[in-house]
Image (cartoon, grey):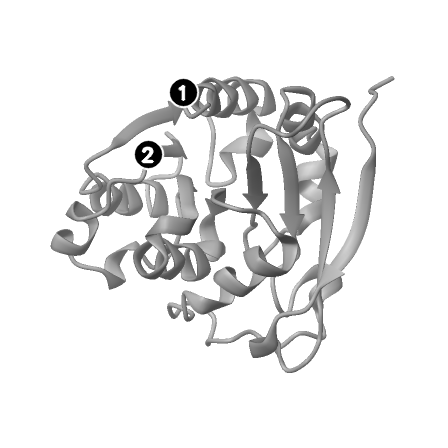
Amino acid sequence: MSAVQITEGTVKVEMCGGHPLFYRQVLPPSGEPKLCVLLLHGIRFTSENWLRIGTLTSLAEAGFRAVALDLPGLGQSKAAEPPAPVGQPAPGEFLRQVCEGLETGPVVVISPSLSGMYSLPFLFQHTQQVKAYVPVAPICTDKFKAEQYSGIQVPTLIVYGDQDTQLGEVSLRNLSNLPNHKVVVMKGAGHPCYLDDPETWHTSILEFLKTLV
C-alpha cells in the first residue's frame, strides 16, 4: 500500500462565475515537497484520470506536491463558467488565480489537449510563475507567434504519441520554437498518450522533474 494520501478540495477563482473549481491533491509521504506540479486535462477527461493511472501517487512518492484540477465546465467543476470559449486562449490570469488560491509557488504545469487554452496564456503572461512546462499535444499552439515562443526560457518537456498525427505534430511544430525544450515521442501511443503507456509517461516526467531540483 502507498503511504501517500489523496485529499480533495475546491479553489475559488473570480473569473468562473463565483463557482469553485474541484481538485485532487497528494503530498509526499515525508518531508517538504520539492516542487508543486499542477495537472490539467483534456475535454474528455478530468482529474480522476491522473488518479486512476497513478500519476498523482508517482509524483508524491518522488517528493512532489501534485494537484490535479477539474477545469471549468468539466468534471466536478461543471458549474464553473469557462473564462473563454472552448478552443480560444483564456486569460493567463485564470491559472495565476488558481495557483495563488492553491499557494503553489512557481509551478510545473502538465497540460494535455484542451488545457492548452489555459496553460499557454499563463506561460506567456506569467512566465515567472512557471517553473517548467509539460505540454502533451495541447490545443491553441497556433494562436501564438514563433517570436513569442522564442522569448520564453522556461524548461519544457514536449510529449506526444507517435500515433497522434494531428494535434501531436501541429503542437510539436509550434512548441519547438521554445528554446529550452526536450521532446519525448511515445511509441504506439495516441492523443492521450499517457493513458496508452503510463509507465513510459511516469518515467519521462520524473526524469525531467529531477533536472529541476
Judge left or right: residue 22 versus residue 126: right
Q: Position of residue 29 (x, y in %)?
A: 77, 23
Place residue 79 in its image quadrant. Answer: bottom right
CB-based contact (under 8 Å), mark 2 and mark 1: yes
Q: Nearer the viewer, residue 192 or 66?
A: 66
Q: Position of residue 60 (x, y in %)?
A: 68, 27
Quarter holding the N terminus?
A: top right
| Cα separation between marks 2 and 1 | 9 Å
Give neighbour class at mark 2: few <14, some 14-19, many 20+ (Cα, 10 Å). many
Per the rendering, the mark at residue 77 is: none
Q: Position of residue 78 (x, y in %)?
A: 70, 69
Residue drawn at x 48%, y 57% is: 114
Judge left or right: residue 8 versus residue 147: right
Amino acid type of the residue that numbered disc 1 sits on in the rendered structure:
Thr
Residue drawn at x 68%, y 33% is: 56
Per the rendering, the mark at residue 211 is: 1
Place residue 59 in its image quadrant. Answer: top right
* Secondary structure of the residue carrying numbered label 2: loop
The residue that label 2 is drawn on is 155
